[in-house]
Amino acid sequence: MTSSAGAGAFSRALPLAMLITQGAIFGAVFSVNKIAITSGIPPIGYAFWQSAIAGMILLVVSALLRRLPAYGYAHVRIYFATGLLALAVPYVVLAYVAPKLPAGVVTLVITLIPAMTYLVALACRAERFRWLSIGGLGLGVVGVLLVVLPKTSLPSPEMTSWMLVALIAPVVSALSNVVAERFRPPATSSLSMACGMLLAAAVILLPVMLFTGNSYLFEAPSAGNKALLIAILISSVNFILFFEIVRRAGAVFFSQFNYVAVLSGIVWGMVVFGESHSPWVWAALVLMFAGLAMVNTAMRGPR
């Protein structure tokens, strides 16, 4: 194998390695969220501090590397757009539903992100229409219905409405994937993008936190504070990988990190909380993965 061929293989394998790493890390978020919120941390305050402190950590790293985020109009616009769509809205939604649903069930909804990303890209004419992709999306919807509709799929029927609220997260996350790919300013590092996005999300969440009375001032040491610290570290790594994978391989490829995140999230929920799931949930998981496989197969065809 020539050196150029080896370099090409490495460049193709690197996004996949980063994808697997990110999915494994991100899967812990659902269990961490549940610990933090059930410990008394308000959801919006939780999302704010997660954004603000993670952003400050990356700002310090950027300063040490002399790669501070640019602040031109195009940069600020993408920071706030991704901060709102990739973090502020989905993180608050997931934090609100965390104590209401099993962590493993919440994890299932993110399996819809790849198919929804395809639909958004299709609407933006960044992808072409494929029947196989539409079929995959249909299987994903059926999978969600298997969790929402049967009375025995969730531990309590009252959880159905919270499951529907949780579906907001994959919709806005799909939007953020496409926005991050299409509107990223050229020659902007993933570290700078992640730092700017996290700080922008904190700016968005600060007035919301104060207006709604969801402030949190780090009270006595607790399991919630430890969970918040873990969430901050996860966010610091997660969004650098997010922007880097999208830069290297595109939004639709990135969205497939949910394959790993779902499995990781379910395992974390079983290990941390001893969760078990009904056959409906496992059937939903199979259908969602089949749908994702169909979308992925279609994406490998000619553009």
Image: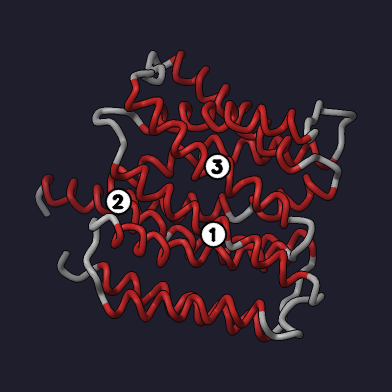
Q: CA distance from mark 2 to mark 3?
A: 19 Å
Q: Quadrant of residue 190?
A: top left
Q: Amino acid at mark 3?
A: Leu
Density class for disc 3 (Cα within 10 Å; few <14, some 14-19, many ≥20) is: many
Residue drawn 70% across and 62% down? Answer: 103
- Asked whether 71 or 111 is in front, the reply is 71
Per the image, label 1 sits on a secondary structure element best described as: helix
Q: Amino acid at mark 2?
A: Gly
Relative image position of residue 246 (x, y in whole percent): 34, 46
Q: Quadrant of the N terminus?
A: bottom left
Q: Is residue 11 above or below residue 137?
A: above
Q: Is residue 212 left or right of residue 293?
A: right
Look at mark 2 in the image and give the residue it sits on: 250
Quarter assignment of residue 230? top right
Q: Which residue is mark 3?
A: 87
Residue annotated with mark 1: 261
Image location of residue 300, percent across then percent down:
23, 68
Q: Label 3 near label 2: C-beta < 8 Å?
A: no
- Tell me residue 42's x, y (percent): 79, 40
